[in-house]
Image: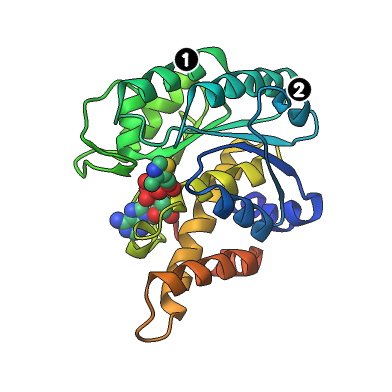
């Protein structure tokens, strides 16, 4: 990992203002649109099979998030994913709750078989399920503390030939050879729905700026964890998760290479 390359991405994303096309869930869609703007990229959410291929022609990155997947949305993902592969823009896959149901497993398997994905970001239970593990899952949240995130990231990155990000208390990013460990974060990030989805969006925003998807993943993952840590620290006494969510968005909006350089805590192996 090159720290300067990663930190430079914060000004690059704001100057290049990449368009990030999302086919995503109906729970966190608005938060994902706003976090795209907060980091300096532009969001577009388009889901109809009639228009997704055309929208991909305008986009710099494509997010596929299966949080509330339905048959028609899935068809749209396949069309958009193929168009993104042909155009050469990165596809960022968020396998929300993949271990929870047979349908989600089928959808994720088919997507990964038919589309070349640049980056996968999920919690440990989700990545474990993708690689055929039997770890416990609790709906869309991680449900198994015994999983080894480093091992999962490395295995999944090699299996799917892409960068894999496993979020959690400690976040792991692997390209199949290197492993980066991000130690920032705050437990309140798990008390607000959508922080995982928004992380995938942040990663996509950076990946729409550079073809160095390993650095883009480190930038996006650390942006969420660092902003969460700072937001919690700056909350006034008595504040709860409502104010935390607002503060989190503010911290992402203000994050730059100087704050990142001073505050990020990263280990490499
Ligand atoms: N136990 C934890 N302590 C501190 N931060 C956490 C913890 N678990 C997850 N996070 C943070 O929450 C954010 C969302 O990650 P995660 O909860 O794993 O995603 P998801 O919402 O998809 O399950 C990340 O920034 C991650 O670092
Ligand atoms: C609660 C919920 N249910 C279906 S999608 C979704 C949002 C999941 O968001 P995240 O994985 O970022 O917590
Ligand atoms: Mg998630």
| Res. 167 in view | no
Residue that carries the numbered disc 2 in the rendered image: 87
Q: Residues within 10 Å of mark 2 (few under 14, many from 20)?
A: few
Disc 2 to disc 1, how far (Cα)?
20 Å
Viewer-side label of 2, 1 = 1
Q: Is 186 located above or below residue 155 in the figure? A: below
At horizontal 42% and vertical 61% (from top left) the residue drawn is 184
Label 1 beta carbon less than 8 Å to ligand 2: no
Q: Is residue 214 above or below residue 242?
A: above
Q: Quick one: quadrant of the N terminus? A: top right
Kindly identify the residue that appears in the image at 23 percent across and 42 percent down: 143
Question: Residue 221 location in percent, x, y?
Answer: 50, 50
Identify the secondary structure beneath mark 1.
Answer: helix
Instruction: Find out if the beta carbon at label 2 lies less than 8 Å from the nearest ligand 3 atom.
Output: no
The crowding category of the residue bearing disc 1, from other C-alpha atoms within 10 Å (few below 14, some 14 to 19, many at least 20), is: few
Q: Which residue is mark 1?
A: 110
Residue 229 in the image: state x and y as whole percent.
43, 68
> Where's the C terminus, which quadrant?
top left
- Residue contact between numbered discs 2 and 1, judged by CB atoms under 8 Å: no
Q: Quadrant of ligand 2?
A: top left
Q: Earlier in the sequence, mark 2 or mark 1?
A: 2
Residue at disc 2, secondary structure: helix
Horizontal side of residue 137 vs 92, given as left or right: left
Residue at 61% over, 23% down: 76
């Amino acid at each position: 990992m090159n720290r300067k390359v990663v930190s430079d991405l914060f000004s690059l994303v704001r100057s290049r203002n990449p368009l990030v096309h999302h086919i995503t869930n109906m729970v966190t869609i608005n938060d994902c649109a706003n976090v795209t703007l907060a980091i300096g990229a532009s969001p577009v959410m388009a889901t109809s099979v009639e228009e997704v291929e055309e929208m991909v022609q305008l986009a710099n990155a494509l997010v596929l998030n299966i949080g509330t997947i339905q048959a028609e949305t899935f068809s749209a993902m396949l069309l958009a994913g193929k168009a993104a592969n042909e155009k050469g823009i990165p596809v960022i896959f968020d396998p929300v709750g993949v271990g929870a149901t047979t349908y989600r497993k089928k959808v994720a398997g088919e997507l990964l078989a038919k589309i070349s994905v640049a980056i996968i970001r999920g919690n440990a239970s989700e990545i474990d399920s993708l690689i055929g593990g039997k770890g416990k899952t609790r709906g869309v949240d991680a449900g198994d503390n015994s999983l080894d995130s480093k091992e999962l990231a490395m295995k999944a990155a090699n299996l799917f030939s892409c960068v894999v990000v496993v979020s959690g208390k400690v976040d792991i990013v692997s390209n199949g050879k290197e492993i980066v460990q991000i130690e920032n974060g705050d437990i309140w990030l798990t008390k607000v729905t959508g922080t995982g989805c928004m992380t995938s969006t942040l990663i996509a925003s950076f990946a729409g700026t550079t073809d160095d998807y390993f650095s883009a993943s480190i930038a996006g993952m650390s942006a969420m964890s660092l902003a969460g840590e700072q937001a919690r620290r700056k909350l006034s006494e008595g504040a709860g998760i409502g104010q935390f969510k607002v503060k989190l968005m503010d911290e992402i909006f203000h994050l730059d290479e100087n704050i990142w350089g001073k505050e990020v805590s990263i280990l490499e192996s």
